[in-house]
Amino acid sequence: MDNKTNKYIAATYKLYVDGDNGKELIEEATAERPFSFITGFGFALDKFEEQMLATPKGQAFNITLSKEDGYGEYMDEYVLDLDRETFCINGHFDHEHIYKDAIVPLQNEQGDRFNGRVVEIGEEKVKIDLNHPLAGETLYFEGTVIENRDATQQEIDHLIKHMTGGCGGHCDSCGGGCDHDDCGCDHDHEHHEGCGCGHCH
């Protein structure tokens, strides 16, 4: 892969959504733990990445992403009732990992992996919401680019190695709090897989 088309970008930012009393802060990437990623690998939302590419090092930015450019509309059909037995281990319900608002990794019959949020635990069913936590939201990023340079071939090769299973599998959506040395994006997006980092975001 031609590293001239792949940039290493790092930024600090505050992410807001519309709240009942104006903008509500929901995530912050600080100077001590910036959001960093290599472009061209789908680690960031397309429109976010485009504007990061156009913003030089040291420059502040204000980016507004519509629902269409973010995570789309909230879809009621993405809320599923799954059999409680699905979450049993050796005949016992997995209370350690399955609780209200827990984010759980799931896999469908085609082998596709994705995360779901536990909404409700019933006697027979567990309600899981597969919508992205920011589905239906307009996203407001306010921050500063602290690095914008060509990614080195070593960085790209290291990232490709990990994406293809060199570290035991792809660092899905940075949900594991991966760092740049391991996975090409550096920020712990624990609440929703990360916003700039997204599909991943």
Image (tube, grey):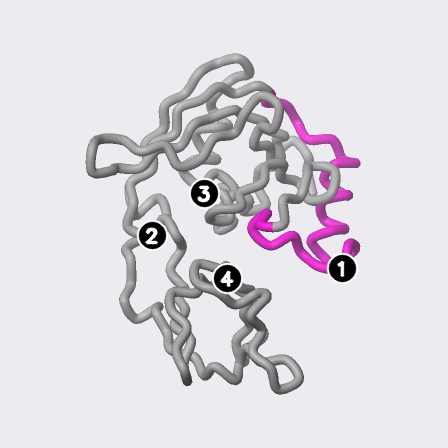
Q: Nearer the viewer, residue 35 or 155?
A: 35
The span from disc 2 to disc 1 (Cα, nearest Å) is 29 Å
Q: Nearer the viewer, residue 116 or 143?
A: 116
Left or right of 94? Residue 80 is left
Which comes sooner in the sequence, label 4 or label 1?
A: 4
Q: Residue at x 31, y 37 (%)?
A: 17
Mark 3 residue crowding within 10 angstroms, few (<14) / some (14–19) / many (20+): many
Q: Nearer the viewer, residue 151 or 187?
A: 187
Q: Amino acid at mark 1?
A: Gly
The residue to which callout 2 is attached is: 135
The span from disc 3 to disc 1 (Cα, nearest Å) is 25 Å
The span from disc 4 to disc 2 (Cα, nearest Å) is 14 Å
Task: Count every numbered label the image shows and give the total.
Answer: 4
Which comes sooner in the sequence, label 4 or label 2?
A: 4
Residue 115 inside the magenta-drawn segment = no
Which comes sooner in the sequence, label 3 or label 2?
A: 3
